[in-house]
């Protein structure tokens, strides 16, 4: 049986077990029912990232998918559960390199020579995660300073520069951790976890599957550091990767469980807990669980009102303003953007401390107006995103939003120039 037929049988079996129709699967994954039928029958080839989308919706483990696509491929766990030995990590790195990157970035399952290979969104970062550059250990204060500088680049939306510096930062943090012992090793693991968290956040911005790998490694290092705040940071990134693959319920479960383990009475852990609740609320909303989404949002708002915002840990601060931004995003995801208009009216974006967060706030406002069919207000919000963070507005999702305005029924002055400037219109 060929690869297409094996994968088709796997997808068909999972769909039937879930009692779903081909139409339901197609609607969820962006395909027609007839296309799903051809895929299940082995008569239509799709690339590996698309297969991952089908697998996530149908509850198929990536290991099963890879085994069907490339028989004999070693199964690899995708969620870190604790400290791994250096030997285990090296084996896992090689397996992931040959399994995930080779299959996901360069193989089109069952495709002939004329088929184009899938291109990773951020190839340099993905390759670096599996083959780090050589680096020497450094003094811990110097490493901590490097991590802080990288975090500042993220908050200032200097994504291009961050993408260039992250591989060497992760390599340096790894070398420093490997050369240390005792408490110094735990502190180096903390720095390494935060480096991988930044890599996961950057990969998420660029819609790259590298976010899964970076978040997994961040969580492994965080658990080795013994720092609850770091575990919360990494868990949040892993939950975001889960949510983006269609596993919203699992993401909410992970976030609420980690939030329960944090002491809400202390400023630092309480702030982390609030941020986990906010991310959980949005994750529940993407799964259309309105009751859970609003419940977590209200709990986060109560937590945020009990203490001043604490900065320096997450790239998302736990403040009332941040809660309002998430409320807009939650209501957008639930399909009730009209309920978010009053929230947007009272939102003071200028109070947010970083360009990245201000740009994200305007992004949610733009999506709200777009869902309401107000192209002019959408464009106004997109221009505010550009003012705050020129690199942010070039993200794939925002380029798609801009293209929608450009080719929509309403003519809006300045959109074509904006689209050309931001990459939404091909030169």
Image (cartoon, helix red, strand yellow):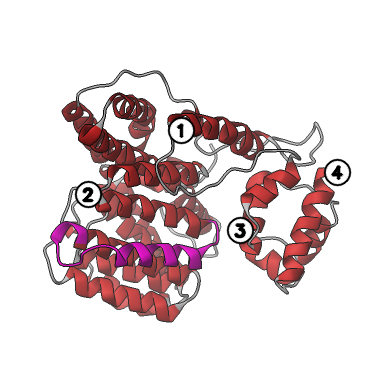
Residue 318 x %, y %: 22, 61
Q: Pick whichever, 330 or 130, lies toward us.
A: 130
Residue 385's spot in the image, x, y percent? 33, 52
Residue 408 falls in which quadrant of the image?
Answer: bottom right
CA distance separating discs 2 and 4: 49 Å
User: Residue 183 appears at what percent x and percent y?
Assistant: 21, 36
Residue where numbered disc 3 is placed: 56
**Does residue 354 belong to the magenta stretch?**
no
Circles 1 and 4: CB atoms closer than 8 Å? no
Label 4 crowding class (10 Å Cα cut-off): few <14, some 14-19, many 20+? few
Residue positioned 73% across, 66% down in the render:
15
Which residue was labeled with disc 1?
A: 125
Looking at the rendering, the stretch of residues picked out in magenta corresponds to: 245-269
- Label whose residue precedes the other's in the sequence (3 or 1): 3
Identify the residue position indicated by label 2 in the image. 313
Specify whether 343 is left or right of 243: left
Disc 4 designates what residue? 2
325 shown above or below 313: below
Circle 3: element type: helix
């Amino acid at each position: 049986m060929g690869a297409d037929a094996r994968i088709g049988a796997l997808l068909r079996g999972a769909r039937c077990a879930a009692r779903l129709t081909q139409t339901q699967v197609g609607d969820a994954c962006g395909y027609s029912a007839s296309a799903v039928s051809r895929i299940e029958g082995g008569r239509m080839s799709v690339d590996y990232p698309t297969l991952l989308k089908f697998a996530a919706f149908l509850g198929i483990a990536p290991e099963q998918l890879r085994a069907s696509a490339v028989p004999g491929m070693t199964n690899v766990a995708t969620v870190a559960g604790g400290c791994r030995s250096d030997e285990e990590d090296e084996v896992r790195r090689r397996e992931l390199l040959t399994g995930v990157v080779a299959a996901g970035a360069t193989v089109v399952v069952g495709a002939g020579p004329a088929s184009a290979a899938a291109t990773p969104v951020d190839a340099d970062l993905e390759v670096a995660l599996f083959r780090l550059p050589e680096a020497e250990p450094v003094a811990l204060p110097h490493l901590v300073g490097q991590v802080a500088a990288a975090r500042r680049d993220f908050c200032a939306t200097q994504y291009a520069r961050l993408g260039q510096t992250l591989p060497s930062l992760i390599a340096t943090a790894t070398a420093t951790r490997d050369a240390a012992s005792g408490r110094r090793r735990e502190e180096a693991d903390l720095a390494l976890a935060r480096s991988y968290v930044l890599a996961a956040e950057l990969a998420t911005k660029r819609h790259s599957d590298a976010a899964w790998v970076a978040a997994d490694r961040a969580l492994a290092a965080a658990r080795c550091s013994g720092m609850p705040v770091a575990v919360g940071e990494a868990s949040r990134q892993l939950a975001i990767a889960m949510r983006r693959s269609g596993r919203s319920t699992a993401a909410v479960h992970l976030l609420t469980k980690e939030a329960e383990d944090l002491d809400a009475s202390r400023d630092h852990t309480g702030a982390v807990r609030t941020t986990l609740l906010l991310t959980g609320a949005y994750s529940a909303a993407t799964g259309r669980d309105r009751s859970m989404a609003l419940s977590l949002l209200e709990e986060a708002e109560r937590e945020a009102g009990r203490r001043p915002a604490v900065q320096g840990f997450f790239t998302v601060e736990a403040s009332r303003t941040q809660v309002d931004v998430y409320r807009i995003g939650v209501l957008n995801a639930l399909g009730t953007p009209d309920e978010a208009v009053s929230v947007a009216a009272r939102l003071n974006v200028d109070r947010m401390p970083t360009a990245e967060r201000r740009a994200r706030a305007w992004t949610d406002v733009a999506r709200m107006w777009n869902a309401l069919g107000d192209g002019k207000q959408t464009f106004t919000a997109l221009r505010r995103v550009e003012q705050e963070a020129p690199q942010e507005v070039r993200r794939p999702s925002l380029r798609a939003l801009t293209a929608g305005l450009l080719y929509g029924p309403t003519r809006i002055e300045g959109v074509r120039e904006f689209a050309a400037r931001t990459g939404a219109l091909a030169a």
